[in-house]
Image (spheres, grey):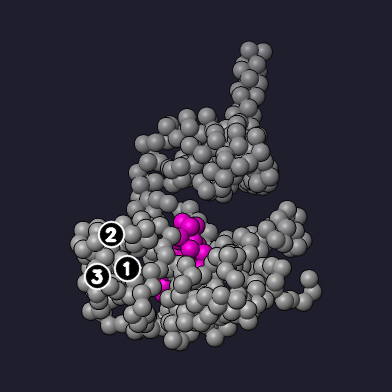
Amino acid sequence: MAVEYRCCETGFFIRIAIITLLVLFAGLMSGLTLGLMSMSQVELEVLVKSGTPSDSKHAAKILPVVKRQHLLLCTLLICNAAAMETLPIFLDSLVTAWGAIILSVTLILMFGEILPQAVCTRYGLAIGAAMAPVVQILVWICFPVAYPISKLLDHLLGKDHDALFRRAELKTLVDLHGNEAGKGGELTHDETTIIAGALELTKKTARDAMTPISETFAIDINAKLDRDLMMLILEKGHSRVPVYYEQLTNIIGIILVKNFLTIHPADEMPVRNVTIRKIPRISETMPLYDILNEFQKGHSHMAVVVREHRDAEQTTTENSIARDDVRVDIHDEMPPQEKSLKGKITLKNRKSLPSEGDINRGFSKSRKWSKDLDPEVLHISDEPLPNFTKEGEAIGIITLEDVIEELLQEEIYDETDNHEGS
């Protein structure tokens, strides 16, 4: 009788231990399902690279586990379901049927769902990293059943559920992290403004940042650098001044104001005798990022914004010419027989000498500048100067400062600007 009693007592405690383990195992699977599946790969990669040392270590352990999300989901749910379905069997041997139902529902609801998910929601990263080896073992155990189901889900729903933030969403996320949002963010107003400006810069074109041609200060190439003109240039305070021919919409180059240091106003030197540099011509639809990249190359920090009104055949012809490697003859490098060709602007092609019509068109590159061009100086002859309004009239001037202002979303004032509240 004593031996039989001890066997019954031992069996009872064994069932209690199994029931406890099943509840804990079901709770662990439920918590890991919520904790691991709520972490996207993008979030984990950010934590690995930029998180605190502990978070980076935990994320590095979890990242290999969550790469195949559907396989992980199927494994955790299969294990959770197996534990919950097994629990009533052992409870039924201890209590009546209705008692087993009540106990199983109570235990699963409280210790298998509510508490584990609440804990894993708060400490999911640390718990997931600690249980990563166990999860890997369970994946291999459940692989024969979980893998086919996961492949079916991959086919029906797609493999990658991680979606990167779109620009508008990322901008809103940055705004929420600003200290002005009142949510504990660390970003200052200037930081959020610059980040937002960088995100919006890709949508803006040259027309959005340019100074209209009607508000542009430029000088006529046929003017004389007398005292009045020199004083006017100094009052404007610009470091570069556009030069036009006949009409303001026909900008042909720029003059660096520092070149005036050696010129005496009493000499009344013609503007055409001063070093005039080539000014790039860009389309009004050119994105600001492309313009910024070109400005960084150092060819010029100012460009003419043009409105194109050319037909398709002419555009095709000019694009083919623009692809040629054309450079300006600055240091009289051309042989005498090539110098005999008098043009509005002296240009040379490495392969062959262009025609006069090609010379007129080769100066303008409305989309991009050639990568091989050095800073170019215009050689003005006594013949009529070029008229670029046929290719696209100038509608404005854009500078590196204009692009930076769009990036900062604030005006940049120098010593000569007239503004209020400084």
Q: Pointer 1 and pointer 3: residues touching (CB < 8 Å)?
A: yes
Segment tinted magenta in the rendering: 280-304
Q: Is residue 289 magenta?
A: yes
Quarter containing the N terminus = top right
Asked whether 102 or 203 is in front, the reply is 203
Amino acid identity at mark 1: Thr
Residue at 37% x, 58% y: name it: 331
Residue 310 percent coordinates (x, y):
31, 82
Helix or strand or loop: what does disc 3 sit on? loop
What is the tally of numbered marks visible in this picture? 3
Helix or strand or loop: what does disc 2 sit on? loop
Give residue 366's mark.
none
Q: From the viewer's perspective, is 274 left or right of 371? A: right
Amino acid identity at mark 2: Met
Residue at 37% x, 61% y: name it: 330
Query: Which tag, 2 or 1, sits closer to the chain's start?
Result: 2
Residue at 35% x, 82% y: name it: 384
Q: Is residue 71 magenta?
A: no
- Examine the rendered structure and indicate whether residue 197 appears above or below residue 118: below
Q: Quadrant of residue 240?
A: bottom right
Q: Which residue is mark 1?
A: 346
Q: Which residue is mark 3?
A: 341
The CA span between labels 2 and 1 is 10 Å
Query: Which tag, 2 or 3, sits closer to the chain's start?
Result: 2
Q: Pointer 2 and pointer 1: residues touching (CB < 8 Å)?
A: yes
Q: Which residue is mark 2?
A: 334
